[in-house]
């Protein structure tokens, strides 16, 4: 008579438990990588918006502002509406939004008509991003120190 070799229920449960532990540790590790990827996208989005602002400036001689000469912080949707408007005629079809785009993570824009600041709140601190602007710039809070999570750029 032949004896069939098979796995016991305990062995199967152990394999499933080990796979579950490995899968959860991988997912935890991917969380920080996803946050860094969203931060990289934020920086790229700000740089592409700079290009749209420069197109607007080359056509009109000022950066979009509601009251030329006054410092003001705008909602990102207002800037998007102006830059993508057919009346503006700078041939921009889309301005990127923050990957999360909720109350905590939104892009920022401040201007006085001749200068502007673009900003984004990052999810992770990264020393390689410490060459950005800090302090209060054109009425926008750009963080207070090296290593903060608010990234601001200007022309």
Image: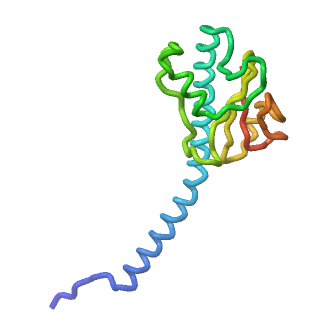
Q: In the picture shown, does residue 15 fall above or below 78? A: below
Q: Residue at x 58, y 31 (%)?
A: 45
Could you say where residue 37 lies in the image, as x and y percent from the top left?
Answer: 57, 42
Q: Can you name the residue that lies furthest to the bottom here?
A: 1
**Way the structure is coloured:** rainbow
Could you say where residue 135 lies in the image, as x and y percent from the top left?
Answer: 84, 35
Residue nearest the viewer, comparing 119 with 83: 83
Q: Quarter of the image holding residue 98?
A: top right
Could you say where residue 111 lies in the image, as x and y percent from the top left?
Answer: 73, 24
Q: Quarter of the image holding residue 130?
A: top right
Could you say where residue 113 lies in the image, as x and y percent from the top left?
Answer: 72, 18
Q: In the picture shown, does residue 117 fall above or below 2? A: above
* Left or right: where 109 falls relative to 96: right
Residue nearest the viewer, comparing 100 with 18: 100
Q: Residue at x 72, y 45 (%)?
A: 125
Q: Which residue is drawn at 58% across and 19% down?
A: 52
Q: In which quarter of the image is the N terminus?
A: bottom left
Q: In which quarter of the image is the C terminus?
A: top right
């Amino acid at each position: 008579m032949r004896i069939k070799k098979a796995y016991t229920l305990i062995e199967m449960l152990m394999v499933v438990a080990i796979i579950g532990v490995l899968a959860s540790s991988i997912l935890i590790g991917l969380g920080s990588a996803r946050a860094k990827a969203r931060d990289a996208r934020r920086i790229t989005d700000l740089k592409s918006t700079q290009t749209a602002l420069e197109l607007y400036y080359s056509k009109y001689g000022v950066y979009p502002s509601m009251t030329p000469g006054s410092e003001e912080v705008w909602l990102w949707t207002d800037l998007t509406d102006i830059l993508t408007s057919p009346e503006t005629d700078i041939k921009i079809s889309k301005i990127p939004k923050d990957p999360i785009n909720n109350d905590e993570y939104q892009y920022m824009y401040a201007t006085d008509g001749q200068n502007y600041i673009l900003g984004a709140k990052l999810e992770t601190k990264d020393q390689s991003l410490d060459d950005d602007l800090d302090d209060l710039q054109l009425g926008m809070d750009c963080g207070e120190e090296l290593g903060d999570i608010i990234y601001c750029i200007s022309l």
